[in-house]
Amino acid sequence: MKKALLIIIGIGVCVQFGVLVSMLVKRELTLRHGEVFRFHTAPVDPFDAFRGRYVALSFDIERERLGTLDTWQLQDNKPCYVQLGTDTNGFATVVRGTECHVAAVFRDNPGNLPVIKARIEKRWIGQGYHHTIKLPFDRFYMPEKLAPEAERVYLEATRGRDRTQSAAAVVRVWRGNAVIEDLEINGVPIVEYLRQAGGN
């Protein structure tokens, strides 16, 4: 009985270890081979921007209306693959199909396109509900000692609607997977931005 229990525990540990290794390998492959996209950030609640050792992020692309969708896409929180492109300012955007109002959203990974695995979400925009995407990431982790100042400059950049400042997450995208590589303020990596601002 004890031997069988030990075998079951051992199998469970091996499975958990295998899942962890798989996640780490996928992350490293994405960072190494992924295509770079810059996601323009949107304002967040200033009282909820920092939790522990990460800065909470929100993105303009999550407010883009997807337009007309197929029946399977109309379910809230439905997983999908969204084709990414770049707008005239160099920020990530949802690619539109032959009709400009229809987004390129797929049930399965098309394999040969720059896509990101996301979820379809119904969001109140303007005067009504519209379907948008919810990205699989919303946190940027960084050293704890830099966090308070990072939070301050990030909030200033995202809440400056005159666009004199800009914040963007640099994201590597590979085979539907996405990993945040850095957070930029005015095109400068945030750690470097803080160093310059501090005169160090």
Image (cartoon, rainbow, N blue to C red):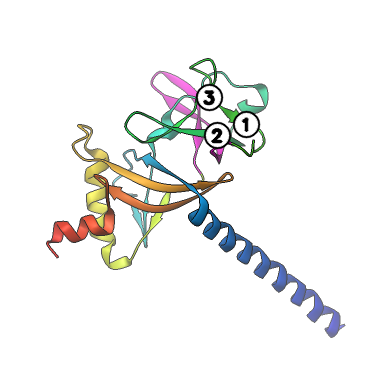
Identify the amino acid type marked 3: Ala
Residue for badge 3: 103
Rendered location of residue 108, percent (x, y): 67, 36
Say left or right for 162 vs 142: left
Q: Residue at the location (33% across, 55% down)?
A: 50
Identify the amino acid type marked 1: Phe
Q: Quadrant of residue 104?
A: top right
Q: Could you tell me which quadrant the C terminus lies in?
A: bottom left
Q: Which residues are magenta?
A: 113-135
Q: Residue at the location (61% across, 26% down)?
A: 74
Q: Could you tell me how far apart the alpha carbons at marks 3 and 2 are, in whole angstroms?
A: 8 Å
Please identify the dominant SS of the magenta region: strand
- Is residue 178 covered in magenta? no
Q: Residue furthest bottom?
A: 2
Sequence order check, earlier mark of 3 and 2? 2
Residue for badge 1: 106
Marks 1 and 2 in Cβ contact (< 8 Å): yes
Residue for badge 2: 82
Say left or right for 166 vs 90: left
Q: Could you tell me which quadrant the N terminus lies in?
A: bottom right
Which residue is at the front of the view, 1 or 146? 146
SS at badge 2: strand
Rendered location of residue 73, percent (x, y): 62, 27
Q: Could you tell me how far apart the alpha carbons at marks 1 and 2 are, in whole angstroms?
A: 6 Å
SS at badge 3: loop
Marks 3 and 2 in Cβ contact (< 8 Å): yes
Q: Quadrant of residue 72?
A: top right
Q: Residue furthest top?
A: 99
Above-or-below relation of 157 to 55: above
Q: Is residue 40 visible?
A: yes
